[in-house]
């Protein structure tokens, strides 16, 4: 039985980022950080932007994108 973090082949998931949660649109094992390009396993995903629908590997990457967007 698959849980929401597993998918066929364990490839990249497509996610809809919501306030305080996310919805898996296409199953997969990970997403890619929009700033660094690093792979983020779904069970480690903690940072994202609802407005930009982007995932971030850490708070530093999230802040960097926020600063770029507000310039």
Image (cartoon, helix red, strand yellow):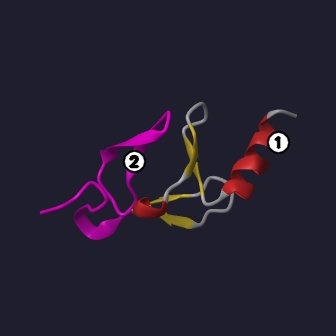
Residue 46 seen in render: yes
| Tag 2 and tag 1, C-beta contact below 8 Å | no
Q: Residue at x 27, y 62 (%)?
A: 6
For the C terminus, the image quarter is top right
Please count the marks in the image.
2
Counting from the top left corner in percent of width and height, residue 48 is at: 57, 45
- Report the residue that reaches farthest toward the left: 1
- Report the residue that reaches farthest toward the right: 71
Mark 2 surroundings within 10 Å by alpha-carbon count, few (fewer than 14), some (14 through 19), many (20 or more) = some
Quarter assignment of residue 8: bottom left
Tag in front: 2 or 1: 1
Kindly state the secondary structure of the residue where label 1 is placed. Answer: helix
Disc on the earlier residue, 2 or 1: 2
Mark 1 surroundings within 10 Å by alpha-carbon count, few (fewer than 14), some (14 through 19), many (20 or more) = few
Residue underneath mark 2? 14
For the N terminus, the image quarter is bottom left
| Chain part drawn in magenta | 1-29
Apparent side of residue 6 relative to residue 22 in the rendered image (left or right) = left
Counting from the top left corner in percent of width and height, residue 33 is at: 59, 57
Question: How far apart are labels 2 and 1 at the CA level?
Answer: 25 Å
Apparent side of residue 18 relative to residue 56 in the rendered image (left or right) = left
Kindly state the secondary structure of the residue where label 2 is placed. Answer: strand
The disc label shown at residue 67, or none? 1
Apparent side of residue 23 relative to residue 41 in the rendered image (left or right) = left
Q: Residue at x 49, y 38 (%)?
A: 20
Residue 16 seen in render: no
Q: Residue at x 52, y 66 (%)?
A: 39
Q: Is residue 5 magenta?
A: yes
Counting from the top left corner in percent of width and height, residue 9 is at: 27, 69
């Amino acid at each position: 039985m698959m849980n929401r973090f597993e998918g066929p082949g364990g490839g990249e998931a497509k996610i809809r980022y919501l306030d305080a949660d996310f919805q898996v649109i296409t199953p997969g094992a990970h997403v890619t950080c929009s700033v660094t390009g690093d792979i983020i396993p779904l069970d480690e995903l903690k940072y994202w932007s609802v407005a930009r629908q982007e995932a971030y590997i850490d708070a530093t990457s999230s802040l960097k994108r926020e600063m770029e967007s507000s310039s």
